[in-house]
């Protein structure tokens, strides 16, 4: 199962690629990141690896395996690219808010992390709004993930998606395209 990440647009998709093609795309991503952050995703059916670019530098890497986000290194991304079985490569344009929100998920360094089904989500969100806090709230269940970004108690971005093979209304891209949540 593949986890889709929020993005501004898809720059490209490559089913068959070589190490030379990966090298070429990494150089193109570095150039693109001068203006807008971006990331490369490698997916082979068992794992997803992400390489993030910002301000003309390779910024960070991440891994999704069995639906779990975890930190990875740039070196691990490059080494794994040669060991994956027929991976698909996707290239996404991001913006700074999405980039930093994703890095929090991958690095698992939130100020508070609650792992229980007994949280009253409405009460938690009401508290964030009432106290005027700035934070990212992420909630997931099986193959569904929702992410809200609060700035001074107001929701500035909302994304939710079921990890499906076929995109549908309500996907991250739908929210971006139709509601302009990531200007």
Image (cartoon, rainbow, N blue to C red):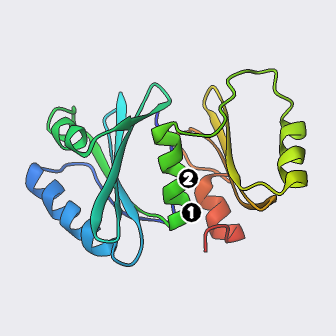
Residue 35 lies in quadrant: bottom left
Residue 124 vertical position relative to residue 131 in the rendered view, above or below: above
Q: Is residue 80 left or right of residue 3?
A: left
Instruction: Compute the Cα span from label 1 to label 2.
Output: 6 Å
**CB of mark 1 within 8 Å of CB of mark 2?**
yes
Point out residue 167 in the picture as x, y percentages from the top left corner: 57, 49
Q: Nearer the viewer, residue 79 or 60?
A: 60
The residue labelled by disc 1 is 97
Q: Residue at x 51, y 49 (%)?
A: 102
Q: Residue furthest left?
A: 20
Q: Residue furthest bottom?
A: 35
The residue labelled by disc 2 is 101
Q: Nearer the viewer, residue 182 or 89?
A: 182
- Residue 8 visible in the snapshot: no
Residue 149 lies in quadrant: bottom right
Helix or strand or loop: what does disc 2 sit on? helix
Q: Is residue 138 left or right of residue 11?
A: right
Residue 53 vertical position relative to residue 82 in the rendered view, above or below: below
Point out residue 83 in the picture as x, y percentages from the top left corner: 16, 32
Helix or strand or loop: what does disc 1 sit on? helix
Q: Residue at x 63, y 52 (%)?
A: 171
Point out residue 183 in the picture as x, y percentages from the top left corner: 61, 75
Q: Is residue 18 left or right of residue 160?
A: left
- In the image, which disc is placed on residue 8? none
- Residue 159 visible in the snapshot: yes
Local crowd at mark 1 within 10 Å, few (<14), some, or many (≥20)?
A: some
Q: Residue at x 65, y 35 (%)?
A: 144
Q: Residue at x 55, y 52 (%)?
A: 101
Local crowd at mark 2 within 10 Å, few (<14), some, or many (≥20)?
A: some
């Amino acid at each position: 199962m593949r986890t889709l990440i929020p993005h501004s647009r898809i720059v490209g998709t490559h089913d068959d690629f070589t190490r030379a093609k990966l090298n070429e795309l990494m150089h193109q991503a570095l150039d693109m990141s001068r203006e807008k952050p971006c990331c490369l995703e490698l997916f082979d059916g068992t794992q997803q690896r992400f390489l993030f670019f910002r301000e003309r530098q390779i910024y960070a890497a991440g891994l999704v395996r069995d639906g779990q986000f975890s930190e990875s290194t740039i070196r691990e991304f490059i080494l794994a690219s040669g060991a994956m079985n027929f991976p698909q490569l996707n290239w996404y344009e991001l913006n700074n808010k999405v980039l930093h929100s994703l890095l929090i998920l991958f690095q698992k360094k939130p100020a508070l992390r609650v792992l229980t089904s007994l949280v009253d989500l409405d009460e938690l969100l009401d508290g964030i709004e009432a106290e005027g806090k700035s934070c990212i709230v992420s909630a997931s269940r099986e193959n569904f993930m929702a992410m809200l970004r609060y700035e001074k108690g107001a929701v500035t971005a909302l994304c939710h998606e079921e990890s499906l093979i076929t995109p549908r209304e309500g996907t991250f891209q739908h929210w971006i395209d139709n509601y302009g949540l990531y200007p």
